[in-house]
Amino acid sequence: MVQYKQTHFDTSFAALSDATRRGVLERLGRSDASISDLAETFRMTLTGMKKHISVLEQAGLVTSEKVGRVRTCRLGLSRLEQEAEWIEQYRRLWDARFDRLDKIVEDLKRRENNDGQ
């Protein structure tokens, strides 16, 4: 069986599987933010937000830096290119299948119309 960088994909997709973490990525896409700001924005405890940030950091989606008492988060280096390519392969596969199905349906309709005349 072929292994497709399962560990990397598992980490990335697990990080993206949570709505709060996706929201954090959207928020950090606008500007860097402290963990306190993120916790306040998402109405959760600092401990809860730190856990979410840890998951995002493991996936390379977020980095953080502590200066004094403030830990500031920003988007990480991962651009999800491999994940996007993996998803794109399946999108192309399903597009091709639906195109074939459309052709079959059109052929059946054409036959039905010809039989009805």
Image: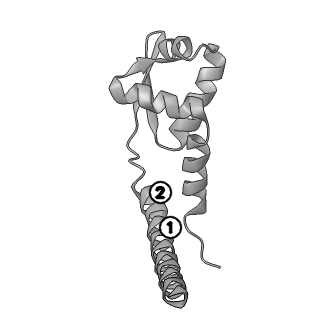
**Under tag 2, what secondary structure?**
helix
Separation of marks 1 and 2 at Cα, in angstroms: 11 Å
Colouring chosen for the image of the structure: one colour
- Give the residue type at disc 2: Glu
Residue 64, image x and y in percent? 45, 27
Of 97 and 77, which appears nearest the observer? 97
Residue 3, image x and y in percent? 60, 71
Quick one: label 2, few (<14), some, or many (20+) residues within 10 Å?
few
Q: Quadrant of residue 32?
A: top left
Q: Which mark is residue 83?
A: 2
Residue behind mark 1? 90
Residue shown at 58%/41% (left/top)? Answer: 15
Of 64 and 94, which appears nearest the observer? 94
Q: Quadrant of residue 116?
A: bottom right
Q: Is residue 31 left or right of residue 2?
A: left
- Give the residue type at disc 1: Tyr
Q: Is residue 36 left or right of residue 82?
A: right
Q: Name the front one of labels 1 and 2.
A: 1
Quadrant where the image shows the N terminus = bottom right
Residue 58, image x and y in percent? 55, 41
Residue shown at 38%/47% (left/top)? Answer: 79
Residue shown at 44%/70% (left/top)? Answer: 92
Whether residue 96 is situated above or below residue 46 in the rendered picture: below
Of 15 and 50, which appears nearest the observer? 15
Residue shown at 43%/56% (left/top)? Answer: 84
Quick one: label 1, few (<14), some, or many (20+) residues within 10 Å?
few
**Under tag 1, what secondary structure?**
helix
Residue sitting farthest toward the left: 31
Residue sitting farthest toward the front: 117
Does the residue at mark 1 contact the one at mark 2 (Cβ under 8 Å)? no
Residue 50, image x and y in percent? 59, 23
